[in-house]
Image (spheres, rainbow, N blue to C red):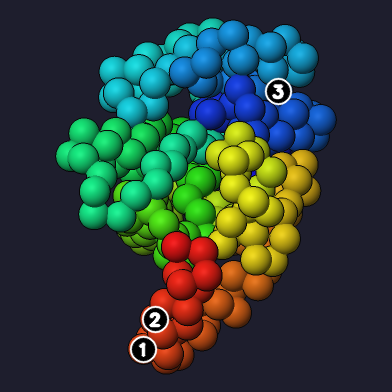
Amino acid sequence: MQVTDKNIVVTGGASGIGRALARRFAAEGAAKVVVADLNEEGATAVANEIGGLAIAANVGVEDDVINLVKTTESRVGAIDLFCSNAGIAVLGELENTNEEWQRVWDVNLMSHVYAARAVVPAMIERGGGYLLNTSSAAGLLSQIGSSTYSATKHAAIGFAEWLSITYGNRGIKVSVLCPQAVRTAMTAGLDNGGVAGVDGMMEAEELAETVIQTLAEERFLCLPHPQVLEYMQRKTGDYDRWIKGMRRLHELYG
């Protein structure tokens, strides 16, 4: 997919990765970029900067996602690319409360489910469309220090795989974005990005370039940090050895 002349929705678009994607899509000549975020003021600032449209939405609430899609369709037109990007992180191991688990689950997984329910049927009817779902390298590997983040990001990848398998032959293209440490508010409090920053911190603008390339090639995995593919291969090649290695990282960073 080339994003030129496409209508694109980006959730979590007020800052970080979402803001970088919105800016890059606009620079690439997108017809209209809809910037969605719980932070309406931040979303409006980004939308005004790029000539887009801001819509306030809590993606962990299905009614908000439905409203986001309906408002976009009525004010902009059909959605060509939906970037389900918003995500949250909560540190903790077994002490996380059920309420914390539910909140992270709703944003990091169910937001993708809500988005797919809202856009896929219309995309199929029109002959196709594209979903870019943001997960994390933690979803392919793991996240030391956060049980909720690790589990929900794994689930997000599982759902993206299922979408591609189920609807790929009906015109629905799916990519899943899996970066390591990116310089955003989420990593601001971590020394050099924590364990996710072992290969260095990436700027969100650099990540956006990888996204453009991935969409153009219509690849499932979007890996801004190419080392992640090697780590995946090590994991599947010898799972027990990989677990032992992760335990050593836990001793350093946990």
Mark 1 falls on what kind of element?
A: helix
Q: Which residue is mark 2?
A: 243
Q: Quadrant of residue 228?
A: bottom right
Circles 1, 2 touching at the beta carbon (< 8 Å)? yes
Marks 2, 3: nearer the viewer: 2
Can residue 3 be seen?
A: yes
Horizontal side of 238 relative to 78 (left or right) equals: left
Q: Amino acid at mark 1?
A: Asp
* Residue drawn at the location 65% of the way across and 72% of the way down: 227
Q: Which residue is mark 3?
A: 31
* Residue drawn at the location 29% of the way across and 18% of the way down: 63
Closer to the camera in the image, 244 or 28: 244
Give residue 137's position: percent from left, percent from top: 52, 60
Precedes in sequence: disc 1 or disc 3: 3
Identify the mark at residue 43; answer none if there is no mark.
Answer: none
Q: Which residue is mark 1?
A: 240
Mark 2 falls on what kind of element?
A: helix
* Residue drawn at the location 54% of the way across and 11% of the way down: 40
Horizontal side of 196 relative to 213 (left or right) equals: left
